[in-house]
Amino acid sequence: MTDEQRVLYRLQACPFCERVVRVLDEYGVDYESRFVEPLHSERDVVKRVSGSRTVPVLVDPETGATLTESDNIVEYVETYYGGE
Amino acid sequence: MDLGFPVVELPSHDAPAEGDGAPDFVRPLVNDEYWVDTALSSLVPSVVVFYPMNGSFPATYIWDEVEERGWDERSNVVGVTASTPYSHARFLDDRDLGARLFSDPSNSVARDWGIANDLDGMEGVEEPRPAVFAVDADMTVEYAWVADEYPEFPPYDEVEEAVF
């Protein structure tokens, strides 16, 4: 494990973000929530991190992965953290 | 302030004094890009500025002064008030300010610090009274000022002498 924190960029009440949160919680994966603003134009930090302004984005220092799109993130979490 | 009539005095407060421990808290801390739950103790040493909610003229005046004096460039400056994270994000958008702002809509941080101001004529709304604390790396209060009148502004020169 690294000391660096796993980070989830999310938007309040965004269903795709909540879906990811549910899966992270299900597998006991801890993360820091960073909330961004609804306007895409106000999301430079997300663009800098992931290359696009969409959320959710999961940045996982444990694997070096930066993931976008909830489908991808859920699949990643299940694959990497879902096993015994 | 000399207005030719008595200014409203605020009731006595129960704020930590110099040498006391600063009550720690966790609240969403807003920077110009996002907000994240943050403990005050993870940011010390800091200058902690409690102020009336965004949109009020004291909020504007206090942060204009902090910005003009460059406190945010000389120290870790954080603000605390009852405004939402969204309001803080807009407030920071409008300014060139290196400070970050804690969002405390329940005002319970101000209550813990003994400086809540229950607003007359705004039922159910409270906010911090203006107050400035310098908190050192051990969470000890090195300097404290709390408003006794309404309105009252921080003694900026005194803060600078004590802190910088």
Image (cartoon, grey):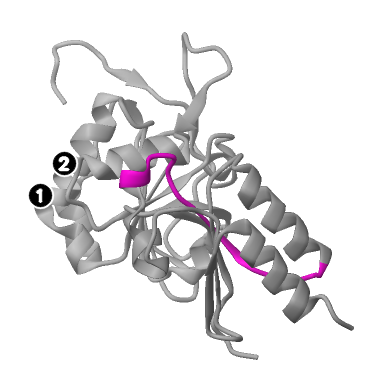
**Mark 1–mark 2 distance (CA, rounded to whole Å):** 6 Å
Q: Is residue A59 left or right of residue B149?
A: right
Pointer 2 indicates a residue of which chain?
B
- Residue B145 visible? The answer is no
Magenta residues, as a range?
Answer: A27-41
Question: Which residue, given by chain and number where applicable, does mark 1 sit on?
Answer: B68
Residue B77 on image: x %, y %: 31, 59
B146 shown above or below B72: above
Q: Position of residue A1 (x, y in %)?
A: 65, 91
Badge 1: chain ID: B
| Magenta: main secondary structure | loop
- Specify the farthest residue to the left: B68
Disc 1 vs disc 2: Cβ atoms closer than 8 Å?
yes
Which of the image's four quarters has the N terminus of chain B?
Answer: top left
- Name the residue located 29 percent from the left edge and 55 percent from the top edge: B99
- Left or right of A55? Residue B55 is left
Q: Residues within 10 Å of mark 1 (few under 14, many from 20)?
A: few
Is residue A15 visible in this depiction of the protein? yes
B141 lies left or right of B41:
left
Type of residue at label 1? Answer: Glu
Q: Badge 2 is on which residue?
A: B64
Q: Looking at the figure, which quarter contains the C terminus of chain B?
A: bottom left
Q: Nearer the viewer, residue B123 or A77?
A: A77
- Tag 1, which secondary structure? helix
Specify whether disc 1 shares its chain with disc 2. Answer: yes
- Compared with residue B89, is residue B105 higher up or lower down, i.e. above or below? above
Residue sitting at x 77%, y 72% = A78
A83 shown above or below A71: below
Q: Is residue A42 magenta?
A: no
Disc 2 packing (10 Å; few <14; some 14–19; many ≥20): some
- Residue shown at 82% from the left, 63% from the top: A26
What amino acid is at disc 2?
Asp
